[in-house]
Image: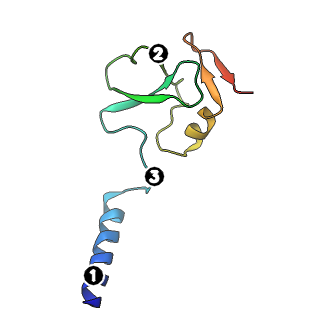
């Protein structure tokens, strides 16, 4: 039984390594992109690729789009908001 448990552990680890999984949880699923709630430091959602953000949300500025929970841009946006015109404000 112990050998079987080890085999399962090795198989699971191999699957993660071979699949290229970084271990970081993506903010949005494939086919979606993250959007920021207007005038909020915490609000975000995911919108379908090729569609505009839903009402009350804006696109993140180019080059500052968070991809994974806790990455550089996710952390950055937790202390900043964007208004409906795209002006970024640091929370005080």
Screen quadrant of the C terminus? top right
Q: Earlier in the sequence, mark 2 or mark 1?
A: 1
Residue furthest bottom in the image: 2
Report which residue position mark 2 lands on: 56
Q: Earlier in the sequence, mark 3 or mark 1?
A: 1
Q: Give above or below for 26 relative to 44.
A: below
Report which residue position mark 3 lands on: 24
Cα distance between the residues tagged 2 and 1: 50 Å
Residue 31 falls in image quadrant: top left
Q: Give coordinates of residue 75: x percent, y percent.
A: 60, 40
Q: Residue at x 37, y 16 (%)?
A: 52
Residue 34 falls in image quadrant: top left
> Could you tell me which secondary element the residue under label 3 belongs to?
loop
Q: Residue at x 48, y 18 (%)?
A: 58
Report which residue position mark 1 lands on: 7
Q: Nearer the viewer, mark 2 or mark 1?
A: 2
> Could you tell me which secondary element the residue under label 1 belongs to?
helix
Cα distance between the residues tagged 3 and 1: 25 Å
């Amino acid at each position: 039984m112990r050998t079987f448990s080890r085999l399962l552990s090795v198989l699971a680890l191999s699957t993660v390594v071979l699949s290229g999984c970084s271990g970081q949880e993506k903010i949005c699923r494939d086919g979606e992109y993250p959007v920021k709630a207007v005038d909020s430091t915490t609000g975000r959602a995911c919108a379908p690729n090729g569609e505009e953000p839903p009402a009350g949300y804006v696109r993140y500025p180019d080059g500052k789009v968070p991809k994974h929970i806790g990455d550089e841009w996710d952390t950055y946006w937790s202390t900043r908001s964007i208004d409906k015109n795209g002006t970024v404000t640091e929370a005080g």
